[in-house]
Amino acid sequence: MTRISYLLRFVEEDAPFGDVTSEAVIPEGTKARAVIIAKQSGVIAGVGEAKALFEHFGVKVEVKKRDGDEVREGDVIIELLGDARAILLVERTALNVMGRMSGIATEVRKLVEKVKAVNPKVRVAGTRKTLLKPMDKRAILIGGGEPHRFSLSDAILIKDNHLALVPLEEAIRRAREFSVYKVVEVEVERLEDALKAAKAGADVIMLDNMSPEEIAETVEALRREGLRDRVRIEVSGGITPQNITEYARLDVDVISLGYLTHSVRNFDVSLEILKE
């Protein structure tokens, strides 16, 4: 599915039989100028998506702020020129997309900067806790984070429900035999299982729902066994903007937070028609 076909689904959902208000009130062929402006400060995202939508409906788009730019309240992000009905048809969908993506990108940028100030080597990642993956994952990238897996097809991540059915070492062996190209990650909640996973050949060990103290102890145990440099360490579960620096100070490689996409705080953007 192309980006524009994905986005058009939202327009079709919003106007399944057209925009009856604009069709009733705005004379056919009316031209208009409009601007999309930031109503707060942060990292703007979704500009590419909004541009694609407006251009699909024949509206001329001039981009003033690009994805990833820092903006302030009142900054003009996009200038529009074209059929007034088309602009108003796309308005809400474009603003919804930009609002959600900018909200994610802004929060990711804040957390990345917070983490890097404590430990420059640690990366901040999202998770699959989202239903709007194409937009949410791209917003995470724009904000400077890692998108993690895009789908179940991308990498092997052996979680607790897999391990309820297959023993840890056997699960890793089966994963290794399944493909030489896929990264094998294992989710564990105990030091003992982290050691087992490393010895069995996991590429990444996710320490899930463990306290900073438990993680530090686990990483030290891996180091004593000569296993730390053979694996990447991801920590997840219970991590918030308030406690993320406690985890960033540890010898870990990635911090992943579902919070980035399942608790999105919308970024305020507005479209204004300019009176001639």
Image (cartoon, rainbow, N blue to C red):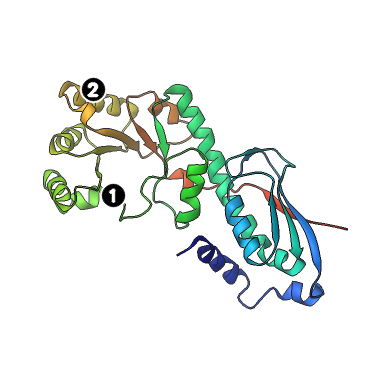
Residue 186: percent from left, percent from top? 23, 43
39 on left or right of 276: left
Q: Mark 2 or mark 1: which is in front?
A: 1
Give the percent coordinates (x, y) of residue 172: 16, 45
Residue that mark 2 sits on: 220
Q: Is residue 108 left or right of residue 238?
A: right
Q: Nearer the viewer, residue 156 or 245?
A: 156
Tell me: residue 9, above or below residue 269.
Answer: below
Say whether residue 198 is visible. yes
Q: Is residue 270 left or right of residue 67?
A: right
Q: Given the image, on which type of amino acid does mark 1 rest?
A: Ala
Q: Is residue 107 left or right of residue 236?
A: right
Could you tell me residue 46's position as x and y percent?
Answer: 58, 51
Give the residue displayed 75% in from the left and 63% down from the top. 82
Q: Which type of secondary structure does the marked residue at label 2 adopt?
A: helix
Residue under circle 1?
A: 155
Mark 2: amino acid:
Glu
Residue 263 seen by the camera: no
Q: Could you say where residue 252 lies in the image, as x and y percent from the top left?
A: 33, 29
Q: Which mark is residue 265?
A: none
